[in-house]
Image: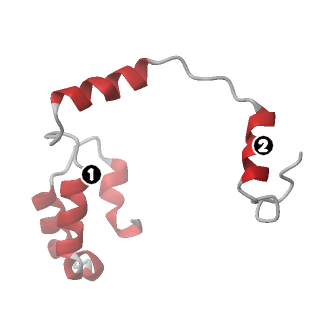
Amino acid sequence: MKKLQVLQDSTHIYNLEELIDYAEKYNIPKLIENKKLVERNYKLMQLSNVDISESIKTIVKEKINEKIPRLAKYKIQVMILEDKLFTAIKNSTV
């Protein structure tokens, strides 16, 4: 990511081809070597052309607009005890 400073400094949204061209132009070997992985991850994570049904989109929108439930500390502590995570989580009783 350090070598891809252009992504952090720019307001331009780069597509996959531009990113690969940039990597080749400025010789970023990790990105070039992992081109297939980057392509797969890009396809999985891109949001411009989402491959989900309308019903799922509606469910997601409803979830986004739902009221955020209040955090109940005691419920979290009960779940920690039920899952026997009290030794894995430092200060789980605080």
- Give the camera-side residue of 72 and 48: 72
Report the residue at 74% width, 41% height from top: 76
* Colouring scheme, one of rainbow, by chain, secondary structure, one colour: secondary structure
Q: Do callouts 2 and 1 mark residues in contact (Cβ within 8 Å)? A: no
Report the disc number at residue 45. 1
Number of numbered markers: 2
Amino acid under disc 1: Met
- Give the camera-side residue of 13 and 50: 50
| Residue 65 sits in quarter | top left
The span from disc 2 to disc 1 (Cα, nearest Å) is 35 Å
Residue 58, percent from left and from top = 26, 23
Does residue 33 sit above or below 82 in this rendering? below
Give the farthest residue toward the front. 82
Mark with earlier residue (2, 1): 1
| Residue 56 sits in quarter | top left
Report the residue at 17% width, 27% height from top: 54
Report the residue at 30% width, 56% height from top: 6
Task: Name the residue carrying label 2.
Answer: 78
Does residue 10 sit above or below 18 in this rendering? above
Residue 20, percent from left and from top = 15, 67
| 59 on left or right of 66 | left
